[in-house]
């Protein structure tokens, strides 16, 4: 009996050791597989500047401590306090996504709704499109005689746009109800561009009047009440002549692309801070699409040089973020996604791109950790679209239409 017990004990010890060995081996294999899959899942890195000397000027890495601030989370319709993370400019922007849209005749203005859906307008149509260029919704009565910043999105994800009769409308998030938010009451002043401040909830409207040609900015609060007009220098001279795009900086400065060849920036109260009239070389500026980023830069498309210029919050030229290339077309419209820090760029000839140019310090996809792909712009369409799709896999599309949208 003793011998039997001894044998049984030995057997179970051997079995135990065996299964331990097996699970260690299996565990290691699983771990390796997991690590490999993480590596494979990283989107390919697209380096625009290879063989593209025109792409970038700025080589200076600038580190900026992002102060805790209110950042909107449009996707969820609420706001939260941003993480105190160190963000920095990348030495060159990465193209994440590129597509030529067939649904619009030019990307004259973009309003980012979520990280994969944007409102895009040409001179006549306003379309909600996803990253595959698939139209998800059309708005019919857009103001059609202008190619300006005609729309914006509020913190709840509702679209606000200028219609044919120059009223400012709001489209509900279910895309069903259009309400008149601000009715046009003065026939001499024509609203030309809108921006909804994520910080104050106010609507900033750039207005234009003919004879004499002049402009102003009107601020409306959340109930649609006019609360401020910005129109003059303290000398009494007019600040604007033809505001075509409008935005706001993090310090609540009001930033306007004025058709009269300048970016005009006033402080929250309306006092003129500076006008940016182009690269220090004196090449002039024809400002079009404009936006600001989380580092308080002002980004503006210049219709003269077909560049996308970055200036600081005080009007100092920093760099050309993008320069016209055949593939990219002429950058014309901009929208900055505060949640992903990605920049949407639209061109005259309907190209829509997404760039990453700001990164978190120590980000996994940092530039040095991935070998650059060859000549990105000529071969990137496939790769970057793949990357984009891949990155979005944990974000379900909201529209059934997407399932039919096969590349
Ligand atoms: C801040 O962000 C980092 C990286 O995204 C994250 O690991 C950390 O938990 C965040 N901290 C807070 C307080 O949200
Ligand atoms: C908007 O402004 C009007 C007039 O100043 C004021 O009565 C109203 O309470 C304001 N609404 C909000 C939401 O601030």
Image: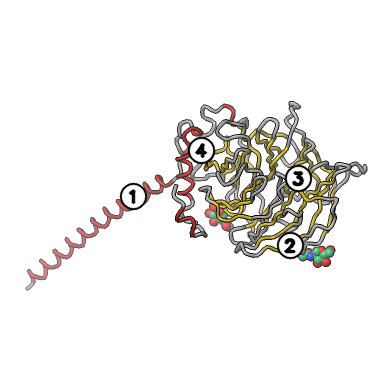
**Rendering colour mode:** secondary structure
| Number of marks present in the image shown | 4
Real-space CA distance between mark 3 and mark 4, rounded to the nearest whole angstrom: 32 Å
Residue 143 x/y as whole percent = 71, 51
Eyeballing the image, is 223 above or below 273? below
Quarter of the rendered structure image containing ligand 2: bottom right
The residue pinned by badge 3 equals: 255
- Whether residues under marks 1 and 4 lie with C-beta atoms below 8 angstroms apart, the answer is no
Residue 284 x/y as whole percent = 75, 30
Residue 257 x/y as whole percent = 75, 41
Q: Is mark 1 within 8 Å of ligand 1?
A: no
Mark carried by residue 367: 4
Which badge, 3 or 1, is on the more N-terminal residue?
1
Mark carried by residue 198: none
- Whether residues under marks 2 and 1 lie with C-beta atoms below 8 angstroms apart, the answer is no
| Front residue of this view, candidates 301 and 134 | 134
Instruction: Tell which tag, 3 or 2, sits nearer the viewer.
Output: 2
The residue pinned by badge 1 equals: 33
For the point 73% across and 42% down, the residue is 313
Helix, strand, or loop for circle 3?
strand
In which quadrant of the rendered view does residue 60 lie? top right
Helix, strand, or loop for circle 2?
strand
Helix, strand, or loop for circle 4?
helix
Real-space CA distance between mark 4 and mark 2, rounded to the nearest whole angstrom: 47 Å
Real-space CA distance between mark 1 and mark 4, rounded to the nearest whole angstrom: 24 Å
Mark carried by residue 180: 2
Which badge, 4 or 2, is on the more N-terminal residue?
2
């Amino acid at each position: 009996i003793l011998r039997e017990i001894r044998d049984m004990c030995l057997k179970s010890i051997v079995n135990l050791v065996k299964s331990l060995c097996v699970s260690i081996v299996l565990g290691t294999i699983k771990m390796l597989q997991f690590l490999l899959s993480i590596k494979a899942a990283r989107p390919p890195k697209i380096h625009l500047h290879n063989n593209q000397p025109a792409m970038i000027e700025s080589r200076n890495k600038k580190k900026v401590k992002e102060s805790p601030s209110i950042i909107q989370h449009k996707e969820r319709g609420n706001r939260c306090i941003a993480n105190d993370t160190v963000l920095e400019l990348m030495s060159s922007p990465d193209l994440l996504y590129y597509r030529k849209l067939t649904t619009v005749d030019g990307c004259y203005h973009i309003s980012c709704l979520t990280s994969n859906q944007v409102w895009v307008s040409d001179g006549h149509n306003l379309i909600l499109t996803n990253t595959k260029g698939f139209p998800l919704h059309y708005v019919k009565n857009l103001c059609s005689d202008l190619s300006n910043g005609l729309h914006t999105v509020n913190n709840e994800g509702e679209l606000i746009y200028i219609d044919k009769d120059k009223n400012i409308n709001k489209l509900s998030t279910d895309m069903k109800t259009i309400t008149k938010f601000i009715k046009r009451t003065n026939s001499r002043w024509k609203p030309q561009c809108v921006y909804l401040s994520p910080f104050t909830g106010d609507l900033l409207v750039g207005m234009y009047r003919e004879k004499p040609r002049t402009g102003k900015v009107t601020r409306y609060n959340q109930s649609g009440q006019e609360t401020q007009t910005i129109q003059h220098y303290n000398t009494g001279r007019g600040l604007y002549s033809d505001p075509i795009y409008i935005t706001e900086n993090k310090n609540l400065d009001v930033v306007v692309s004025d058709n009269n060849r300048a970016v005009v920036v006033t402080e929250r109260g309306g006092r003129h801070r500076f006008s940016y009239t182009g690269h220090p070389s004196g090449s002039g500026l024809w400002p079009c699409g404009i936006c600001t980023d989380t580092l308080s830069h002002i980004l503006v498309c210049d219709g003269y040089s077909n560049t996308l210029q970055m200036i600081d919050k005080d009007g100092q030229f920093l760099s050309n973020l993008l320069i016209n290339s055949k593939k990219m077309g002429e950058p014309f419209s901009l929208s900055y996604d505060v949640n992903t820090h990605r920049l949407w760029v639209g061109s005259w000839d309907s190209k829509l791109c997404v760039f990453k140019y700001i990164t978190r310090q120590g980000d996994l996809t940092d530039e040095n950790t991935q070998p650059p792909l060859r000549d990105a712009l000529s071969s990137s369409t496939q790769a970057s679209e793949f990357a984009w799709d891949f990155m979005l896999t944990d974000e379900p599309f909201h529209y059934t239409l997407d399932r039919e949208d096969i590349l």
